[in-house]
Amino acid sequence: MFSHLLDQYLSVLALEKGYSEKTIEAYAGDLNDFLNFVEKRGLSSLDEIKAPHVLLYLSDLRKRGFSAETVARKLSALRGFFRYLALEHGLSENPLALIEGPKLSRKLPVVLSAEEVERILEAPDLTTPIGLRDKAMLELLYASGLRVSELVGLKIYELNLEVGFVRVRGKGDKERLVPIGELAQEALKVYLERGRPKLLGKRLDEPHLFLNRLGRPLSRQRFWQIIKTYATKAGLEATEITPHVLRHSFATHLLERGADLRTVQMMLGHANLATTQIYTHVQAETLRRVHQKYHPRG
């Protein structure tokens, strides 16, 4: 009943906003869930959907056991959909105009100390092609703050070791240049000279930078396993260590050493500065702990 409107909206997200296939699937799932809900209650036109129907839907989500974070995500998807309907299809009344989302507790990200990061970076065995690859990946991840999908998706031609930059294609297909630093440059040079050729074998046309034992692109899931292996080897609690932890540590360590928030935002590829501002909360929490530990009246 509403499927043609949903299809049009998803096409706008894909073609005009450049959202990835995975993001489009998530939007489709959330919006279909709501549209199925109102259709089962006999609603057949947009103008019939009112605020009480949205409130009933939110109550239904809670009864089904969805977390506050999931409810907030579904509500955000609905807001975007109804804004589109108002602009493009003349919807007279937005049923979400006065609806407030659930209050979310902001969980601070796990951040490693510089010494803990160093232990992970030193864990790979540099006598093997796999170890050289892992060393290069870990150094690059910490030097650049890339998302894991951006890291494993890198192509050789997106790396410029002479200048010390990597060209990254991030969320929404947006491109950014990120500096990588001398230690990451050196690890990448060694991997390209002594590690990658042995992994590549006869697959000379493979453009991906980081390869598995079969000469194929490394997967996100495999890199998650790799980083947990090195966390354990470094004596850290592996359950807490993910690729995103190195991204968080990258951002926090930059800010602790005087980098400005806008610069860190650009390097992380955040569309909104508010997303980057969580790292100022991390800094504040670190300062509080130091004060508590060392001040005579802490």
Image (spheres, helix red, strand yellow):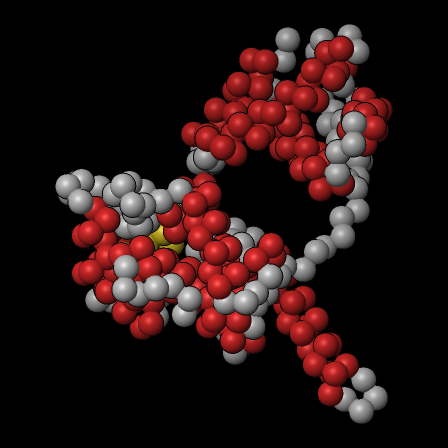
Can residue 56 be seen in the rendering of this structure? yes
Residue 278 found in image quarter: bottom right
Task: Tell me residue 68's x, y (percent).
Answer: 76, 41
Above or below 128: residue 21: above
The total number of labels drawn is 0
Q: Nearer the viewer, residue 298 or 121?
A: 121
Quadrant of the frame with the N terminus: top right
Vertical relation: 45 (above or below) 189: above
- Residue in front for this viewpoint, 67 or 115: 115
List the single residue furthest toward the bottom.
296
Give coordinates of residue 222: x percent, y percent: 43, 45
Q: Indicate the position of residue 150 as horizontal and vertical percent values.
A: 40, 48
Counting from the top left corner in percent of width and height, residue 217 is at 32, 42
Residue 104 position (above or below residue 57):
below
Is 198 or 104 nearer to us in this picture? 198
Q: Quadrant of residue 27?
A: top right
Q: Residue at x 36, y 58 (%)?
A: 134
Report the side of 189 relative to 28 (left or right).
Answer: left
Question: In the picture provided, is 159 more to the left or to the right than 92?
Answer: left
In this view of the protein, can residue 140 be seen by the observer? Answer: no
Q: Could you tell whether 231 is left or right of 84 in the image?
A: left
Q: Is residue 63 left or right of residue 94?
A: right
Residue drawn at x 75%, y 16% is 38
**Residue shown at 41%/70% (left/top)?**
122
Q: Please name the residue shown 76% across and 52% down the image.
A: 105
Quadrant where the C terminus sits is: bottom right
